[in-house]
Each structure stands twice: as C-alpha cells, then as structure tokens.
Image: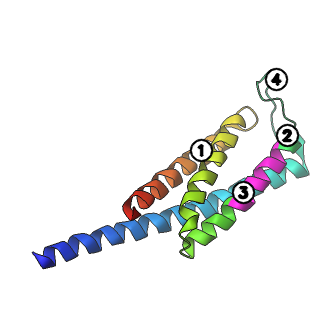
Amino acid sequence: MTQQTYRSSATRNGWAYGMTLFAGVWLTAVGLFQALEGISAIAKDTIYAKTPDYVFQFDVTTWGWIHLTIGVIALVVGVCLLLGQSWALVVGIIMATISALANFMYLPWYPLWALVIVALDIAVIWALSTEYSARR
C-alpha cells in the first residue's frame, strides 16, 4: 500500500512539474510574441488592416505600446515560472488573462494572429490553474 501511495504522489508531482514547465515556456513565448507584435505596431502602423467603426477606437501605435508592455511583463513572469518562483503562478494567470483580453480587443486589426495568442493564453491559464489547485 505504501508503494502504491508513493507512485501516485510521484505521478502527481511529475504532472505538476510538467504543467508548470509547459506554462512557463508558453507564457515566455506569448510574452515574446506580444512584445514583437507591439514593436511592429509602434515601428510602422500602416502594415495592419484597420476595420472601421469598431467599439475600441485606439490608434494602432497605442495598441503597440499596450502589447509591448504586456509582452515584457509576461516574458519576465514566464522566465520566473521556469526558475521556480511560486508567486509567478498567480501573476502568470493574471498576465495571461490580460493578454487574452487585449488580443480579443485587437481582433479587428489583426484577427488571425490575435486568435492564436488568445488560444495560447487559454492553454497557459489552464496549465497554471491546474498547477495552482494541485499545490493547494
């Protein structure tokens, strides 16, 4: 009975480590993608197709600064997750949520890329939430 308990505990710890590693890598990647998206929007805003009459009336350069800020913070949090910082679990969930919301609002300017980032953010939120509940 003791050996079986040990195996289930080791399996659970392996999954927890794997999910944290998954979330750290993807949050770092999403942060990098967000930062690159922001830099390209700041550098030259004419490469994006604008959709008129949308609820969120921001200039593309403004969106660039928003994405650059979110991307840099998400990149730092992702690296801290990979380094094993426990506070990064909660901050990572918050940053992935903010990133998903920002990209949802950015859909009219670059829809396919925004959907890819939202999907990656959802995967990060799932992995970090699973890991956070396992540690509680």
Q: Is residue 126 left or right of residue 94?
A: left
The residue drawn where x is 66% and y is 48% is 99
Q: Amino acid at mark 2?
A: Val
Is residue 43 visible in the rendered image? The answer is yes
What residue did someone put label 1 on? 118
Q: Is residue 31 left or right of residue 125?
A: right
C-alpha distance separating marks 3 and 4: 26 Å
Disc 3, SS:
helix
What residue did someone put label 2 on? 60
C-alpha distance separating marks 4 and 2: 13 Å
Is 44 in the magenta? no
N-terminal of the two: label 1 or label 3?
Answer: 3
Secondary structure mainly formed by the magenta segment: helix
N-terminal of the two: label 3 or label 2?
Answer: 2
C-alpha distance separating marks 1 and 4: 22 Å
What residue did someone put label 4 on? 52
What residue did someone put label 3 on? 71
The residue drawn where x is 56% and y is 69% is 81
N-terminal of the two: label 4 or label 2?
Answer: 4
Mark 2, Cα crowd under 10 Å, few <14 / some 14-19 / many 20+, is many
Q: Amino acid at mark 1?
A: Val
Residue 65 coordinates in the image, percent (x, y): 84, 50
